[in-house]
Amino acid sequence: MFLYSSFIIELTNEITKAAKRLMPFKVSADSAMNFFISFSIYLIPIIFSYLLTRYSISAFLSNKSNNAKFSQPISKFIEAHNKKNVPIFGGVFMLISLLISTLLIIIMKNLLHTFCPSFFIIFRKLTIFSMQSLFPVCLAVSFAAIGFIDDLQKVKYRKNSAMSAKTKFLLQIITASICVILFRKVNPLSNLSYIDKISTTSSSDLNFLSLAWQVFVIVGTANAVNLTDGIDGLAGNVSKICIILLGFISNKNAYLCFCMVSIINAFLRFNNNPAKIFMGDTGSLLLGSFMSGVALESGVEWTFAISGGVFIMETLSVILQIASVKLFKKRIFPITPIHHYFEKHYTEKEIVYYAKKITLFLSFIALMISLLN
């Protein structure tokens, strides 16, 4: 214990010396100690979100009766899957962790401002939480509620698909529109999309175009993640990489993004192949709406679209398949989304591995483009 304390004191002194050389203002030993205290507080929500998600899911799975009780029947068209008695409420635990973490972040921010103001002096450009951060959180909660209703009906009626596609789509459009309009009322000065950032007028036509674009991005992303969620760990791993990118290019929502990454990491402990729990529509709609909210609020929709190439590929495969069947009465692929077609040639682990590599490559390109701009 004495050696550990000596090491901490020595490390503090060394970092204080380095800070004096690098920072334009004077740094004392007390301010360095305040920095360590502040940084520890800063990490609390990130660590807490991971632990809460991990141990709440673990506690849920420890009751074996929950596996069959809250499982979802697998579609008869998917031959490669033999996953019975896997519960689908992983997204519920992700939602709970996001809400509690958001509350903890707000409390932590007030504590830091009150007791450790030196933290904000050192990290002058860091925004821990702002009004803009509420937009992706509200979107995530609202869309997760739609997914939760659908998941409940699947479990209750023992069906692979309970809520009709038209009903779900309509609810998503209404929910996205309400969230965007309300956020505009609360924060009218925010440029809530790429269209807002490049525009110089505020006509009613532009407002309608901006609203339509934002709803399209939100609903499109939410459903893209939902379609991708068909293989153990696929949607979670791809989403995690995209959110890390958003965390780097979004100043106002970076901290919230890293908390979400922590939540996804905890969930993937139980969702990577072989999955012990699925995220369900609750989780997939939560992740999609959260990512689109961060991207829109930061005005980086196109950058996010590059990194989310896997989501776009999955969605296009479904759209092209439906269009081909409607117009020509022929299928382009034996089965869609396209990851189920890949299952005929690769294992689930291989598909997830390649999807992660592709997303990492696309995210690197997106990051370079963002830095150049």
Image: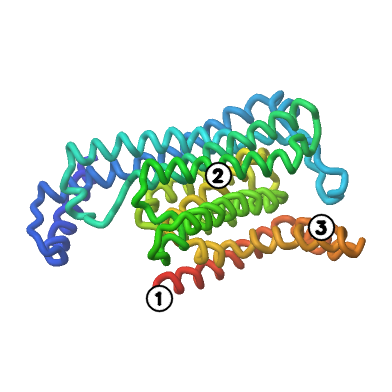
Mark closest to the chain's N terminus, 1 or 2 = 2
Q: On screen, 190 above or below 18? A: above
- Pointer 1: residues within 10 angstroms few (<14), some, or many (20+)? few
Q: Nearer the viewer, mark 3 or mark 2?
A: 2
The residue drawn where x is 14% and y is 57% is 16
Q: On screen, 36 above or below 167? A: below
Q: Secondary structure at mark 1?
A: helix
Nearest the viewer among 337 and 326 is: 326
Q: Is residue 290 something one can see in this rendering?
A: yes
Mark closest to the chain's N terminus, 1 or 3 = 3
The residue drawn where x is 47% and y is 62% is 195
Q: Secondary structure at mark 3?
A: helix
Q: Quadrant of residue 317?
A: bottom right
Marks 3,2: beta carbons within 8 A: no
Residue 340 percent coordinates (x, y) = 78, 56
Q: Nearer the viewer, mark 1 or mark 2?
A: 2
Distance between mark 3 and mark 2 Cα atoms:
25 Å
Q: Which residue is mark 1?
A: 372
Q: Amino acid at mark 1?
A: Leu
Instruction: In the displayed orientation, state which residue is furthest to the right.
Output: 329
Residue 341 percent coordinates (x, y) = 81, 60
Q: Amino acid at mark 3?
A: Ile
Residue 322's mark?
3
Q: Which residue is mark 2?
A: 176
| Quadrant into which the C terminus falls | bottom left
Q: Amino acid at mark 2?
A: Ala
Q: Quadrant of residue 91?
A: top right
Distance between mark 1 and mark 3 Cα atoms:
38 Å
Residue 161's mark?
none
The residue drawn where x is 17% and y is 37% is 115
